[in-house]
Amino acid sequence: MHYAKWMTLVAALGIASASIGCGGATPDAETPVEVEVGAKERILQYRTTLGQLRDSRFAKEAKPDLDMAESWLADADAQLRSEDPQLDLVELLLQAARGQLVKVRSFYGRRESESTLEELRGDYEQQKQQIEELRDNEETK
């Protein structure tokens, strides 16, 4: 899992590096502080979302993805707390965590749909069996 986490991060870095140079605006002196404050708020928001996702009945099935998101949030938080935080890395880690949370939500949606379908299928089979029993009873009369 550790290898997959870092390979995903490297891929995201590659995508991010491809967009370097697209913006020509020079950031002012306050931009790092604004990014840092925004990052702290996003970490709190994502941790809240992560806690909610861990309460799902499907959380056991999504545990590796939830753990990966939690790990990226911890890395982003540690980077922000360091003496010289690399804000680009923090942003990348937050994007990776967000993507992981979106993936888990999608998985939950799919599992919920599958569960509902299975319940409906069971109801259908039960009703079908009842109809066949009624037909059999009518034929024997």
Image (spheres, helix red, strand yellow):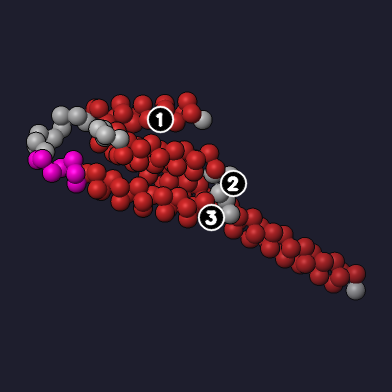
Q: Amino acid at mark 1?
A: Thr
Q: Quadrant of residue 26?
A: top left
The type of residue carrying mark 3 is Asp
Question: Which residue position holds label 2?
Answer: 60
Residue under label 3, please give it: 55
Q: Is residue 38 left or right of residue 44?
A: left
Mark number, residue 125: none
> What is the x, y in percent for residue 38?
25, 48
- Upstream in sequence: badge 3 or badge 2: 3
Looking at the image, residue 118 lies above or below residue 136: above
Looking at the figure, which quarter contains the C terminus? bottom right
Q: Secondary structure at mark 1?
A: helix
Task: Say which quarter of the image contains residue 125.
Answer: bottom right
Which class describes the residues within 10 Å of circle 3: few (<14), some (14-19), or many (20+)? few
Extent of the magenta region? 28-34
Is residue 55 something one can see in this rendering? Answer: yes
